[in-house]
């Protein structure tokens, strides 16, 4: 049961998390396959990080897709920026801890596959696949 959203009004991280819950629950009802609550939490965290980063650093969410693909959730988030995600040093120039900068490493650690692709009209699409069963 794929879920797609395309630029019709504001999109929040909670919208993508809700889409993931609906897709996973729908697949579970259809196939009778259970999913792991802890793994679902990982998928929800990845969705939150991708959408928050698109809002804070990518000029806003322009599109998202959620689908359950076998034992995994595939979430794709598009934004307006061509800038690729980066890993920030956790310490600033004075050796103090920075706030933020942990989202991309979380996505890369929890997802079994992460792809970043440029969009023909500008911007980028990040797709992460997170196992849920």
Image (cartoon, rainbow, N blue to C red):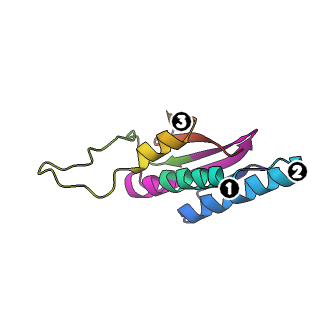
Question: What residue is shown with label 2?
Answer: 30
Query: Which of the two marks, 2 or 1, is nearer to us in this view?
Result: 1
As measured in the structure, the alpha-carbon distance from the residue carrying label 3 to the one carrying label 1 is: 21 Å
Question: What residue is shown with label 1?
Answer: 37
Query: What x and y, as percent, mark residue 61?
Result: 51, 55
Q: Nearest the camera: 87 or 39?
A: 39
- Give the residue at the far left of this rendering: 94
Residue 47 appears in the rendering: yes
Question: What residue is shown with label 3?
Answer: 114
Q: Which of marks 3 and 1 is nearer the N terminus?
A: 1
State which quarter of the image contains the C terminus: top right
Q: Which of marks 3 and 2 is nearer the N terminus?
A: 2
> Does 75 appear in magenta?
yes
Instruction: Give the side of residue 82 with respect to residue 65, left or right.
Output: left
Up the image or down, 73 lies above or below 25; here it is above
> Does 67 appear in magenta?
yes
Residue stretch rendered in magenta on the structure: 51-76
Query: What x and y, as percent, mark residue 32?
Result: 87, 49
Q: Crowdedness of circle 2 by 10 Å Cα count: few (<14), some, many (20+)?
A: few
As measured in the structure, the alpha-carbon distance from the residue carrying label 2 to the one carrying label 1 is: 18 Å
Q: Earlier in the sequence, mark 2 or mark 1?
A: 2
């Amino acid at each position: 049961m794929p879920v797609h959203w395309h630029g019709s009004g504001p999109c929040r991280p909670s919208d993508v998390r809700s889409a993931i819950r609906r897709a996973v629950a729908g697949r579970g009802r259809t196939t009778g396959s259970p999913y792991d609550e802890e793994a679902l939490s990982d998928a929800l965290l990845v969705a939150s990080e991708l959408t928050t980063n698109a809002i804070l650093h990518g000029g806003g969410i322009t599109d998202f897709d959620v689908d359950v693909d076998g034992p995994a959730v595939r979430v794709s988030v598009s934004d307006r920026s061509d800038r690729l995600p980066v890993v920030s040093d956790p310490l600033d120039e004075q050796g103090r801890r920075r706030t933020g900068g942990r989202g991309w490493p979380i996505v890369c650690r929890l997802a079994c596959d992460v792809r970043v692709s440029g969009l023909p009209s500008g911007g980028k699409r990040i797709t992460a696949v997170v196992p849920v069963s």
